[in-house]
Image (cartoon, coloured by chain):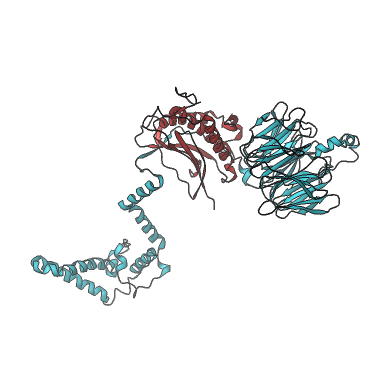
Amino acid sequence: MSQFKFVTEMNNLVTMDGPLTKGPPPRWQRKGQENYQSSNNLSLNSSKQKSFSTSITKTPTKSEVKSKKTPTKTPNKNRSNGSKTPTPNKTASKTPVADRFIPVRSMSNFDLAHYKLSQNEDTSDSPTQKELQKAMFENLHGANIDSQKILSYTNKPPTAPAGFQNPMRVIYTQTKTPASVKSNNRYIPQAPDRILDAPDIVDDYYLNLMDWSAGNVLAVALGAHVYLWNAGTGNIEDLLELQGNDYVCSLAWIQDGDHLAVGTTNGTVELWDCGRAKRLRVMDGHSARVGSLSWNSYVLTSGCRSGQIIHHDVRQREHIITTLSGHTQEVCGLKWSPDGRYLASGGNDNVLNIWQSQTGSHHTNNQPLHIFTAHQAAVKALAWCPWQGHVLASGGGTADRHIRFWNCNIGSCINSVDTKSQVCALLWSCNYKEIISGHGFANNELIIWKYPAMTKVAELTGHTARVLHLVMSPDGSTVLSAGADETLRLWKCFVKNSTKTKTGVQTLEKPSILKQCIR
Amino acid sequence: MAAVAPKNKSAITLKGSAEIVCDYLNFGINSILFQRGLYPPENFQSVENYGLTILMSTDNKIKEFLSTTLSQLKEWLLQRCVTRVAMIITNVKTREVMERWDFYVEYEGNADEPGGAVSEKPLKTIKNEIRDVLKQIASSVAYLPLLDCLCSFDIQIYTKSDVDLPGEWTEAQAAHVKNAQSVKMRSFSTNLHKMDTVVTYKNED
């Protein structure tokens, strides 16, 4: 504000020449001149007569200031100096200008005035300001600004080669990666076959909220509810509702039959008979929410937020067989291999553990067989290869974005592929040698990969938020994806070619292999 | 890793503690270089440590720069004259500071007898603490803005003023990030050195 006031004043002074010079000087000007004279007189007097000075000194000094300033403001002076611009003056605001000088904005040079003003401020780095800076620094950093040195080595590290682009761009930008054009001899519909509503589905990467049973019933957890959707008939049943603020964290169907395991926020695992819609038992043992479940015959394995994994024998009264502590953070991925030899567990601690089952039993040893730390983010997506029982596919979160393949017999990484997006879920097809992955930002898509070449077969887009979970129908033809956009989408992407698979059907329809498809 | 003290096999001396700190910085800075995408990913090689797989740069110049800087830092840590180590990420073209990773050093234990001070903290606990910080560094890409320009990095060491300037070292200007936002990571301590890690980045909004 003061800046503009000042600018208008300056302009008044500059533009006033002309009309005012003619005619008598204004009253305030005359007065100033009178004062000037009188002050001169007085100062003379005071030097002569000391007795006067004490009483009058106040007025002379005052008038002197005035008299000194005023002449510089007079139009006369300005005219005499010609084009010289007036220097900024701090006391300028004191001069009475309001009544006569009406500012003309169009004629004012604001840019120059502002420049002059700001320049002035820069140069006046007053000692008080320096003092203030010092005090501020001491307060902020706890050390005196002078008692600290900042040192650096002079031989700087090299910069990245020119033209190099930050590879992390994939995490932030929505660029459609062109699918590698692979001659496809089958038709994959690009749009979902069906879209179901899934209101209140918990958008949490670490949970496992869907499972599709061998009896063609899909279980979905939406908030505190578990719904059963019969894919054959389309019937929907509300199986259970948790009380209070609890919500369902994980679901898993037993390999054969009607039994559903439900993991909850309060650390219990509930066992439900869905044929009769009846709760069979509640198993405790965990201190935090149970985010992952997997069955191996009568053993139910549950993974907890605390990082513990418990094997429950669901037939026994004392159901806890063993507790595995191989993770330091939440266990978000848990899968038994189809032949029951290995258990894979992935955690938020970026660790993937492989546990070997004890010979003759359905639970594992206390020590992991392999510890894989190659993932740079949480490992949630886990899937065992249906035709090679020792091959595991695992996918990492945002900071990792890789799908890795592991040979669990020898404990080595077979292959890895950068998907450029968070991997939320993985499923193997049992009809084709392909694997499907669900992704988060940027494209929120499903990608079908040819295995083992890992070339993209198809990209299925449609979800408007990240794909959280994937499950496969018992016949292996349909994949259901649950998205954070509160929709479930059915993709008929692995429909068997009836003419071609005449021979293949025989092997696929063996019950034991069929079971493997579901897990 | 830690130098062995005569009394207790698991005790960590000041020298061992400084070494732990420098090791952490080496792994941490390399991890930042990889995760923030400063250099092409093919120039990195995975190394196992702290129960993690960490990607380390294979570029000889970067390796040399880090080893010289960190060995000098180790000396200063022993003299207890370092207060902060800052990793500055700057835009190569505009020289603008894009991001700053601060590693604050605090000294714990008895300062009167340097060299005699030992820590009884088990190495495994320290390594676990370091692992947790390194994990947080790796997952920071989830919230940090994209460095969408050619960037370089530098390391500045904040010391007390009575430190002699070694050859090939200069005094630098403090680097400030405009419109800054900070996130503090977990800290770890050897009971002789405590290290806080803070990332400061430019807020885009």
Residue A162 shown left or right of residue A119 in the figure: right
Does residue A491 appear in this view? no
Residue at the extreme top of the image, as rendered: B6
For the image, the number of numbered tags is: 0
Residue A344 shown left or right of residue A39 in the figure: right
Q: Quadrant of the C terminus of chain A?
A: top right
Q: Position of residue B134 (x, y in %)?
A: 55, 37
Residue A345 shown left or right of residue B144 in the figure: right
Residue A48 shown left or right of residue A476 in the figure: left
Q: Quadrant of residue A101?
A: bottom left
Front residue of B70/A385: it is A385
Q: Quadrant of the N terminus of chain A?
A: bottom left
Please give the name of the residue rendered at 20% of the width and 71% of the height, measured from the top-left corner: A35
Q: Position of residue A391 (x, y in %)?
A: 75, 31
Please give the name of the residue rendered at 19% of the width and 66% of the height, measured from the top-left corner: A61
Residue at the extreme front of the image, as rendered: A317
Please tell me the colour of chain B. Answer: red
Q: Which chain is cyan?
A: A
Front residue of A293/A319: it is A319
Please give the name of the residue rendered at 41% of the width and 67% of the height, measured from the top-left corner: A107
Q: Position of residue A131 (x, y in %)?
A: 32, 50
Front residue of B40/A245: it is A245
Q: Position of residue A336 (x, y in %)?
A: 74, 35
Does residue A1 appear in this view? yes
Q: Quadrant of residue A160?
A: top right
- Give above or below for B30 relative to A110: above
- Give above or below for A378 relative to A133: above
